[in-house]
Amino acid sequence: MSSQTLASPGGSPPGAPPATAAARGRVLPFPITGQEIVLIAVIAVLWVVLAFTTPAFFTSGSVVPLLVAMAPVATIGIGMTVIIITGGIDVSVASIVMVCAVIVAKAMVDSGVSLPVAVLLSVALGAVLGLINGVLIAYGRVHAIIITFGTANLFKFLGLQIFGGSTVNGIPDTLDVFGRGDAGRTLGVPHSFLLMLVLAALAWYYLRHTPRGRHLYAIGNDADAARLAGVKVQRRILSAYVVTGALTGLAACFVIAQGTATLAPNVGAGMELAAIAAVVIGGTSIMGGRGSVLGTVLGALLVQTVTSGVTQLGWRSQLASLFIGIFILVAVGVDLLRQRTRRTA
Amino acid sequence: MSTAVSPPAPTSAPPDETSGGRPSKLGQLPSAILRALLTNRIILLLVLIIVVLVTMFTLSARNYLSAPYDVSYLSGTLISAVPLVMLGLAELLVITSGRGGIDLSVGAIVSFGSMIFGFAYGQWGWPLWAAILLAAAAGALCGAINGFLIAYIGYPALITTLATYYAFSSIAIVINNQQPISTRPIQDFFSAARSVTVVGGSSPLQVPLGTLTFLLPTAVVVWLALNRTTYGRRLYAIGTNDVAAEWTGIDVRRTRFLAYVASGLISGLVAVVTVAQFASARPDAGVAGNGMALPAITIAVLGGVAITGGIGRVAGVVLATLLIVWLNAGILLAFTGNAGSQFQLFALGIVLVFAALLNGLTQRRYGGTG
């Protein structure tokens, strides 16, 4: 993160000086970068358009479910951001969601565990699965995408074995604190969304303002240089996967709470791509070394806005993926363009 | 590490240095075999295939399996190898092109191509060859979109193909209102997935027609393109080091672009195979369940394609597919009911992680795989 990245965000003309005198003294980039401003603008435009075209959009009956629905993907996205910043990726999170969800659901049905136990169990389980990923990637020195493709299959096998060929029925309402209903909100704000925001804020502070957080960026930029500079590269990478596993375990609780009393073996399907989409729409570079959690939360919000917007406009729900695809391309395109002007400036 | 630089071997030379010649030729054999096994993916895959076959034949002979695991069963299961090999080769091309090359959208292109083929052959009444050409062209067009964004604009491949995965699969579903196309001609097209006799005589060997009409031609064409044309040399060159390739005068962008077009084209052909297999053009043909992209990438990696680009062989992809298909076929007979398909996931995951770790190990010990 050199001062070159401090170039004024958004639509600054290419000829503008790269950094102002005040900014030159800064080590960190601005709290909000260009990508995030673009995202906020796009979301604002979408919300205004939706508010005018569908009168029901701005009622709390529409916005609150949107915030609830984005919580699981955004929670996973926080961890995924950290992993992608280090230059890795984790495509096994959907399978981790499945394993955690089925074990917690079974524990609630069979032995009626309480809320804290259920959440702790899910988080710990997710962390263990993340630890497996992390050990293989950090110490096996294999590219993350290959290992997580492999463990995705293994975790899925584990989950299906526990499902045992049928659904889990009669799940009690232990986890309704995170659900869609009235039990899941305080003053109209859903708990799952709040918890996600708190975690995102913690991650944001950690990544920006602690030495270990900065080390993660250093690893993503050049792992060898980071190692020579004294960063414990393998340990930091390992921790990124463990944290993501734990967050994915928490997201699994959200997923159970949002669903019905029945849990089917397809739980979590597609969440790995959704989380990666939220991260890259949020401006995190897939090459590592650059990105922010704030962008990821905005990216998840954008994806969810598009999804529910398409439904509310009465369009076919599958069109949502077309728009998500286009948004990914536009977001990355804008980012490429900004990098290019920065380089020539 | 390298044996080439070692001077006439001192007496303390470790036994696995083959250039020394001090220990007897016979004494070196075990380490030479180990070395070949670890560094040559083709040999490793061959050994693994033999292990799987011997194990399964033994289990079959002792009646542990629910049906005989014999040659005709093995050739019958090759039908599921057709899409795997073809998409694995598609991934081989794009991964070899380097710069984080990967194609997550192949499954979505298969869905899209299936619908296009369904329209042309099932509803518009086009002749078969024209419908196949159209499906291939549609796939190539999708691939061209990927290739243009990645090679010419400079998008990261993972993101581009993730985005087009969403876009293409959405179009495939919306294009015909989520409905599959299974008109009369499409249903009759199921005959393209039948088995034909290749070896006559006393014990005729039945082989799925798709392996002869689609799999073999694709494998041969890709092999020729990679090993017998300048395009192949260029592709390996840009995958190994695209800056150096640029300086030698190779049109890096065009070469990479064509790799993605070829990947899309092969996916379009796979769409035709899939329609024949299901006797129906399904809008979710390539993305249902786990999708087709992840298994294809798995096969490519297992076949020794280096995710960093520049390394990869057609034989590796074909052998990796045979290993997985025949292992899966055995697992299906060894377990009853749903458990079989679950253990297939387990086997695939274990084999992939094992192969990847082995790659990392050999790279450190011997400096790269052959």
Image (cartoon, rainbow, N blue to C red):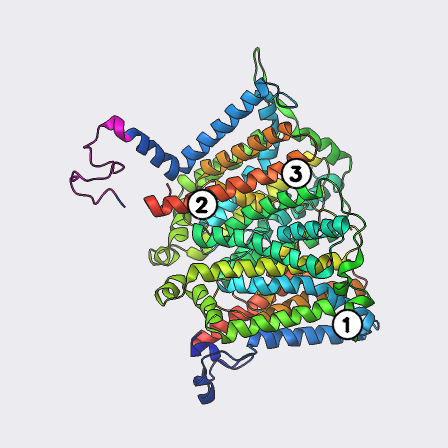
Of the 4 image quadrants, the one containing the N terminus of chain A is: bottom left
What label does residue A50 carry, if any? 1
Which chain letter goes with mark 1? Answer: A
Q: Which residue is label 2 attached to?
A: B357
Tell me the element at label 2: helix
A88 relative position to B23: left or right = right
Q: Which residue is label 3 attached to?
A: B274
B92 relative position to B133: left or right = left
Residue at 57%, 60% (x, y): give it: A244
Q: Are marks 1 and 3 on the same chain?
A: no
Name the residue type under label 1: Leu
The x, y position of residue B327, in whole percent, is: 56, 31
What secondary structure predominates along the stretch shown in magenta? loop
Q: Decide: marks 1, 3 in contact (CB < 8 A)?
A: no
Which region of the structure is painted magenta? B3-28
Please tell me how crowded label 3 is: few (under 14), some (14-19), or many (20+) other residues with Cα within 10 Å. Answer: many
Name the residue type under label 3: Thr
- Residues B367 and A113: in front is A113
